[in-house]
Image (cartoon, rainbow, N blue to C red):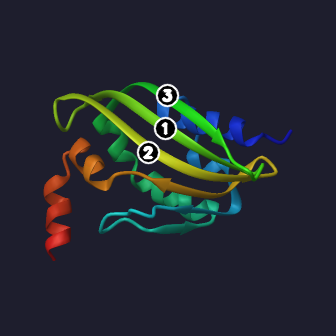
Amino acid sequence: MSRSPREVVDQVRRMVAGEGVTFADLFAIDGVLRYPFAPPGMPRELHGRDAIRAYHGAASDRRAMLEIEDVDVVVRETDDPEVVVAEIEHHGHSHATGGPYRFRALGVIRVRDGEIVSYDDYMDPIAMAALLGRTPDLVAALAS
């Protein structure tokens, strides 16, 4: 059974919440994940489910830095029935900062035949670095 874009976004929400969904499994085999505001050291584009799986598997230590308490999603439909804009916000406790946090990102997601064929993930790299206690790394990367 093919999932609608809204149903796929709900799976993304479950992934962010840590509810047993693997992000790469939501993508078509040749799907593309883009990070238009990628900080230094982070890829701007990942092509294919295997590349997405490899990158997110290697980066899974970042998740341990957060205790996510809740994830909210607002889905905005577009003129194109394959494309939705998802506002994804999560909050909880950051082990890096020792305090509460709230983080929001926007995703422009194209779904075809129940799988993500493209996902443009717009997140604030400065806020993410601060949340994960990586601000010095970001500053050093920008200075070089």
Tell me which residue sits at (57%, 42%) in the image: 86
Tell me which residue sits at (39%, 53%) in the image: 59
Q: Kindly indicate whether the residue at mark 1 contacts the one at mark 2 (C-beta within 8 angstroms).
A: yes
Circle 1 is placed at which residue position?
88
Q: Is mark 2 on a helix, strand or loop?
A: strand
Q: Is mark 1 on a helix, strand or loop?
A: strand
Q: Where is residue 118 in the image (x, y as percent from the top left)?
A: 64, 59
Q: Where is residue 84 in the image (x, y as percent from the top left)?
A: 66, 46
Q: Is residue 61 left or right of residue 132?
A: right
Classify the position of the N terminus by image quarter: top right
Task: Check disc 3 and give the amino acid type.
Answer: Asp
Tell me which residue sits at (25%, 42%) in the image: 131
Q: In this view, does 99 lie above or below 30?
A: above
Asked whether 73 or 30 is in front, the reply is: 73
- Going from N to C along the chain, the mark reached first, 2 or 1, is 1
Tell me which residue sits at (43%, 34%) in the image: 89
What is the number of the mark on residue 72? 3
Measured in 3D between alpha carbons, the distance from the residue under mark 2 to the one under mark 3, in whole angstroms, is: 11 Å
Q: In this view, does 72 lie above or below 141?
A: above
Task: Check disc 1 and give the amino acid type.
Answer: Ile
Q: Is residue 101 left or right of residue 142?
A: right
Mark 3 Cα shell of 10 Å, populated few (<14), some (14-19), many (≥20): some
Furthest residue in direction bottom, as rendered: 144
Asked whether 15 or 131 is in front, the reply is: 131
Circle 2 is placed at which residue position?
105
Task: Check disc 2 and give the amino acid type.
Answer: Ala
Q: What element carries label 3?
A: strand
Classify the position of the C terminus by image quarter: bottom left
